[in-house]
Image (spheres, rainbow, N blue to C red):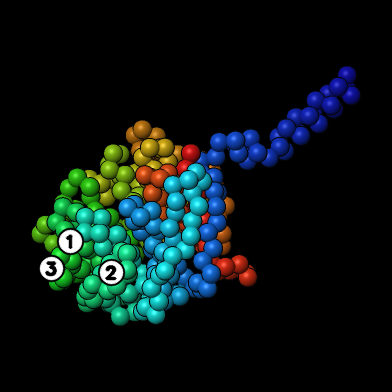
Amino acid sequence: MVASFCLLASLAAALAAAPLPALVAEDPSLTLESRVELPGVGGRIDHMAWDAKRRRLCLAAMGNGSVELVEFDEATPPAARVVKGLRLLAEPQGVAWLEERDELVFTTGGDGHLRVHDPVTLAERADLRAGGEADNVRFDAKSGLVWIGCDEGLVAVDVAKRAKVATVKLAGHAESFQLEPDGARLFVNVPDAGHVAVVDRVERKVVATWPVAAARAHYPMAIDAAAGRLLLGCRSPAKLLALSLKDGALLQELSIGGDADDLFVDEKRGRVYVACGAGEITVLARAADGTLAPETTIPSAPGARTALLVPDVARLFVAAPARDGKPAAVLVYAAR
């Protein structure tokens, strides 16, 4: 009897010690599909954009002074090749493809400019003054304006007219910001001031500020419009905060990986992905009402905090900087 009890106890202990990841690995939320190396690219990699027409990923290699282009074919998994990029740039940071105009635009924080290039030849079409430390870029298809975060606040540029048309002053450098899809508001992280600034894109002015008190260093942001939530990734401490889109009230807070810099809502799969420089991707399960819960943690690479979710191809691209003798690379994850 004692022997049987001991056997059962040993079996229970063995089952309890079984590695759970092996049990869920059959259908992981993200599967590392490929690693596309970026030879000769050193330093920090900042933002990325996707050119759907050419199936190209564009990376602003800030520390390398270059813009890198990676082209993917339509196979499954897709094969990739690094194509001609742009070099000798002053700290490229924000980048966007303007699908309607078929143009590549990116900011160079070192000189505060917005640059417009031909997507095929990469020839420069325009070079416009934006603002100090020009950073994130968002295109507003409704107005045709490109919004740029910089030291002065937010700058609006009419790319068609090649002219800066407005500057919205903020209480600090504009970090990640998002455009309300079905409204006229724009939400911007201002970590220096400890708040989110709410901007009216039509009036081009700040209409509210929402204090962020539960954590500091809120850099990445995403809008969950269906659930009426604004999601902020914070670094101190490492948390994700969910605010009400109505008034900025704190609805939820969850622990995430350290050094978060990008986050995305995957509407189709009901998930939120947070790219963390600590070397992981935090995956949160999203309920129908928008409530979030921890789902899993996917390993990435040290310093890999820049990412881009492209729903049309069901891929999460994560940029891994050159570290420990390994070259810089794009980690391609298939979303399940």
Image quadrant in which you'd find residue 8 = top right
Q: Mark 2 points at which residue?
A: 117
SS at badge 1: strand
Q: Nearer the viewer, mark 2 or mark 3?
A: 2
Q: Name the residue under label 1.
A: 145
Q: Nearer the viewer, mark 1 or mark 2?
A: 2
Residue pictured at 36% horizontal, 79% vertical: 90
The residue type indicated by label 2 comes to His
**Whether residue 26 is situated above or below residue 174 in the rendered picture:** above
- Nearest the viewer among 155 and 332 is 332
- Nearest the viewer among 76 and 332 is 76
**Whether residue 88 is situated above or below residue 311 in the rendered picture:** below
The circle on residue 61 is none
Q: Is residue 171 left or right of residue 184?
A: right
User: In this orientation, does residue 203 appear?
Assistant: yes
Count of numbered circles in the view = 3
Image location of residue 259, percent across then percent down? 48, 61
Q: Name the residue under label 3.
A: 161
